[in-house]
Image (spheres, rainbow, N blue to C red):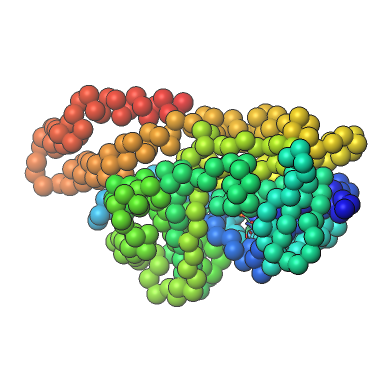
Amino acid sequence: THKNFDAIVVGAGMSGNAAAYTMARRGLRVLQLERGEYAGSKNVQGAIMYANMLETIIPDFRNDAPLERHLVEQRFWIMDDTSHTGMHYRSDDFNELSPNRYTIIRAQFDKWFSRKVREAGGTVLCETTATELARDSSGKVIGVHTDRAGDVIQADVVVLAEGVNGLLGTRAGLRETPKPENVALAVKEMHFLPEEVIAERFGMTGDEGCVIEAAGTISRGMPGLGFLYTNRESISLGMGCLVSGLAATMEKPYDLLDGFKRHPSVRPLIAGSEVKEYAAHLIPEGGFKAIPQLFGDGWVVVGDAAQLNNAVHREGSNLAMASGRMAAEAISLINSRGKPMTKHNLSLYKAMLDKSFVMKDLRKYKDMPSLLHTNSRSFFMTYPQLISQAAKNFLRVDGTPKIEMEKATTAAFIKARSRWGLLSDAVRLAFAWR
Ligand code: FAD
């Protein structure tokens, strides 16, 4: 048998497209396989797209990429059952010439990105699932088997960009199946509303957009987050919780999303909308400690399949694009030097990742997942309730002297968590954030 391609990319999501495009542009013969009917047909994302990481790959993407709104406002809400306490940031500086963050609709965006891969010379085969990795007698990955009739498709290197489930890699023993405490299940709906209604409700002009992220009693004590992103004529609304939490409590993601939608702070924002799409998807949230082996003889793994996801900042697609690009740059360099795609040579990819924001950010928050996991009830139930109560005490005017109000607030915190508990929560949070 002979080598068919320089590289095979499995998956046409953010990481796969970044990798395939970068290699094709550098003249490599690239085959990309996508099991969906088209790139993006299987993909779910909130979705905020971070421009910088795409700009590095396609500098003039703003000319024709399907972008919804550029974000000028971020709201973070801590919720109890009837209220939210918010931290909002809005800035006209975000109305810059080349905005930094956009909302996108993945089905459209991935299709566009895939077209770019083709234009750059890559071969893209949709409705094709890579079923197994092919190896030679030394164990080196030499290609893939697919669900289409025919032989193994061979290449010097396989880029695994298959997303969070990563069946191909786990089946081949390259990494473990993600553990339930390391993945969140997110459910999401698209609420359609006229463009001017969205603009008015959120105080936006033109294609300005707004994001709301919310934590608190909506996740019923589990580590979880609700989100609302404005698109041009729709609102992406969803809720994600750790799978281990859902399994332990038997809560249904649907019910949680329903609770979020019915919350008095959210309901008016989506009133009158028409729900057209519903989707569920996993998000890798184990962080730095859950990152598997990233390269080996004849293979590298990128994006969600490599657990490269920053749950604290809700960033995934940017790490996916950056890791896909870096894997592609490493491969192109090895190829141009006429060197083989050995584990040793492909370690260049890991070295590039280590030097970048990807590993630096994930390392920074390495203790966050376990902190939120072990203290989830205090962080997602008790504190939000206490904060709401404190805000209410502060604002309510009923003749009670302020000093008594303050004492009541302090007493409530101590009663719920004890002085020692409050101190230890603060210290642990500070350490995990450091
Ligand atoms: P994916 O985008 O999942 O792509 C994997 C692709 O591989 C899929 O197209 C799949 O069909 C294909 N595939 C899998 N197996 C095979 C196979 N064997 N053969 C052929 N094809 C295969 N990130 C952000 O940056 N901002 C956000 O606002 C944000 N919001 C999110 C909201 C939700 C609800 C979810 C679920 C995720 C969100 N993320 C967000 C995370 C982001 O979506 C992911 O990090 C990103 O999509 C990862 O890209 P990827 O290419 O690694 O994987």
Residue 58, image x, y percentages: 76, 50
Q: Ligand 1 is found in which quarter of the picture?
A: bottom right
**Residue 38 visible (yes or no):** no
The image position of residue 120, as x and y in percent, is: 84, 56
Horizontally, residue 423 falls left or right of residue 330, namely: left
Q: Nearer the viewer, residue 361 or 185?
A: 185
Locate residue 157 relative to residue 220 in the image: left or right. right
Q: Residue at x 52, y 46 (%)?
A: 177
Q: How many marks?
A: 0
Q: Position of residue 269 (x, y in %)?
A: 39, 64
Q: Quadrant of residue 81?
A: bottom left
Task: Name the residue: 57% across, 57% down.
Answer: 103
Name the residue located 32 percent from the left edge and 28 percent from the top edge.
426
Residue 108 image position (x, y, % from top left): 65, 65
Q: Visible in this render: residue 273?
A: yes
In the image shown, does 78 or 334 lie closer to the viewer? 334
Residue at the far front: name it: 137
Image-based side of 111 in relation to 85, left or right: right
